[in-house]
Amino acid sequence: MLQALGLGADVEAVYRGMLADPSGGVAELGARLGLTEEQVRAGLDRLVDLDLLRPSRDCPGALRAVRPELGLELLLRRQEEELVRRQQELARSKAAAAQVVSEFAELRPNTEVDGAERLVGMDAIQSRLEELAHGLVGECLAILPGGALSEASLEASRPLDRRALARGIEMRSVYQDSARNDPATLAYARWLTGQGAQVRTSPLLPPRLLVFDRTVAVVPIDPANSRLGALCTRAPGIVASLITLFEQTWNAAVPLGADRPRPGGTQPTTAELELLRLLASGMTDEAAGKRLGVSLRTVRRQMAALMERLNATSRFEAGLKAAQQGWL
């Protein structure tokens, strides 16, 4: 039940056991819970680290359990602080990656300079991806924003992915949450997991990214203008920044087979929070929909639902109430 807060099943059992009866030693607690002494000691150490167990003032050398209403609030606060820190790191990584990629925007098409090559046209991009996929020896990382992928893109990717997975290549891909609403994209993602790949989704993603064996990266030169083509780079500094961006995105995403938890009451989902933040920053409905990989109709439907839950008669009032409740 408390795994979402970072407590494993054994740790949660030890915490509940200490709340119920803090008396007795490790062996007695293990016997009550059906755990080994090693598991109990590991659980106690973890609970001390999380500040859910503190030294007892009545029994020197013993521990007492912090009551859930205080302890779990502290855990939630720490998770919120960690999320803010990770979002700030992600923003810095995005800015750094965008800056270095822009420096190569003037490369002549399909020529390589200082380890970077500008690829223009789908044929040039597909040829280079086929070459890189054929040469894979260990790992392929992918960020695939935009929700639904085209049938042509899926069909072009399938033979490359099939051959790579058959050779034992580790594949990790992050799709946008809205891809779950497109039957073809969802079916392809499930096919990937069935072949041994790992797939996660996130409501908001950075631009498209492919990294091959942590040595070569392929990114769009300008995500807003696909005619400029893609950048294929082996520059260690750029590739390292893009790998950091991928790992931060991966850690914030959820596995394909897991539903995003919906908070109780009127609390918004992660996707709804992202929509509120984008609109509050001044984005139009259409621009916010593109960032989230959803249609304009979906954006307006989600905003109407949020206004109803906030009991707001206008978007301005909804923004005020969302801010008052700490959503923004």
Image: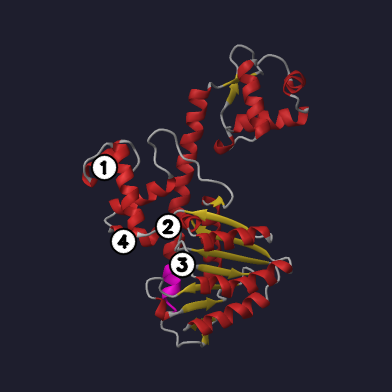
Report, in whole angstroms, how far the alpha carbon at label 3 lies from the one at label 2: 10 Å
Q: Earlier in the sequence, mark 1 or mark 2?
A: 2
Residue 80: within the magenta?
A: no
Q: Earlier in the sequence, mark 3 or mark 1?
A: 3
Report x, y in % for residue 326.
34, 38
The mark closer to the camera, 3 or 1, is 1
Secondary structure under the numbered disc 2 in the rendered image: helix
Q: Which residue is mark 3?
A: 97
Q: Are marks 2 and 4 in contact (CB under 8 Å)?
A: no
Q: Earlier in the sequence, mark 3 or mark 4?
A: 3
Secondary structure under the numbered disc 1 in the rendered image: helix
Report, in whole angstroms, how far the alpha carbon at label 3 lies from the one at label 1: 35 Å
Give amino acid for label 2: Ala
Give amino acid for label 1: Ala
**Does residue 276 show up?**
no
Q: Which residue is mark 1?
A: 318
Residue at x 51% of width, y 64% of height: 144
Determine crowd level at label 1: few under 14, some 14-19, many 20+ residues with C-alpha closer than 10 A.
many
